[in-house]
Amino acid sequence: MQFTERNNAHSGLEVLGQRAAEIAHELNNPLTAIANYAKVGGKLAKDLEDCKKYARLYEVFERIEAEALRCGELTNSVLTLARPTHIVECSLSAVIDRTLELLQAACKSRRSVINVENCDDIRIAMSPCKMQQIFLNLIVNALESSERSVDIHISGEYLTDEKTFKLRIADNGDGIPKQIRETIFQPFFSTKQETNKNNSGTGLGLAIVQRILIESGGNICLATSAENESTAFELTLPLHKSNNESQITNIAS
């Protein structure tokens, strides 16, 4: 009995330790955005007599607040490990737009282009914060998958059960070597060690994405098959009940 209790306690600590590491990893994205927005806000504050710049300054500090709140939501997830989660919803296109805005500077510096299709008017049964975590991790991974410029294509389609939505995120980077594809979702295993020697990564991004999706009733798989093929991931996302038949017909046509 004592052994079982110790074993359960050890397992609980392992889960808590992994979640803490995930949170530390995830906080890097919003904190980087906070720092960037604060830098822009400081520059704009020097010229407040310009009305247009003042309006932009207000928007910048709104973004800072939003990212700070997202940090709070991530850290609060540690406190809710044992609590049942409530199903919420988000607009897929709104989350994508928000994510691309955060990554605008990174795309510009790498001369990368991100195209999106068939993702409008879709309600997903997940929180906006979790959806943004998924997109940030997958897109940043794609951008950093090669030392050269990488373009990304995001496309979606309803599955036949009409309860899930398939999202495909593909890039034209260097791809993932075949010998490591079975281990890419393991915590602390980084694909960047093999594909980009200048950025080894933490090895948590894909593990976080997989965990979020499975806990939400979805999943993710690597859709790449050929040896030297560029990377593509396919995600199944749980649809919120607010999606009606007309929306399903419109996007499928």
Image (spheres, rainbow, N blue to C red):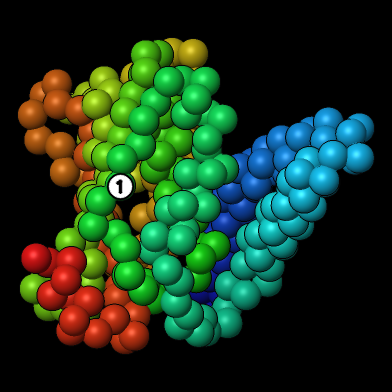
Task: Give left or right: position of 66 versus 178.
Answer: right
Is 200 placed above or below 152 here? above
Which amino acid type corresponds to the residue marked 1 in the rendered image?
Val
x, y percent for residue 149: 37, 18
x, y percent for residue 165: 23, 67
Q: Is residue 42 visible?
A: no
Q: Residue at x 85, y 39 (%)?
A: 50
Looking at the rendering, which quadrant does residue 241 occupy?
bottom left
Looking at the rendering, which quadrant does residue 52 occupy?
top right
Is 243 placed above or below 56 here? below
x, y percent for residue 161: 12, 78
Task: Give left or right: position of 188 versus 250.
Answer: right
How many numbered markers are drawn? 1
Task: Give left or right: position of 198 versus 194.
Answer: right
Looking at the rendering, which quadrant does residue 62 occupy?
bottom right
Task: Give left or right: position of 26 versus 155.
Answer: right
Q: Residue at x 12, y 66 (%)?
A: 252
Q: Residue at x 57, y 66 (%)?
A: 12
For this rendering, which residue is in front, 212 or 59? 59
Q: Residue at x 73, y 52 (%)?
A: 59
Q: Is residue 230 visible?
A: yes
Is 124 placed above or below 72 here? below
Q: Read off the residue under disc 1.
A: 116
For this rendering, which residue is in front, 118 or 83? 118
Task: Please tell me whether mark 1 sits on a helix, a strand or a loop.
Answer: strand
Q: Quadrant of the C terminus?
A: bottom left
Packing grade of label 1 (10 A; few <14, some 14-19, many >=20) is some
Is 176 placed above or below 222 here? above
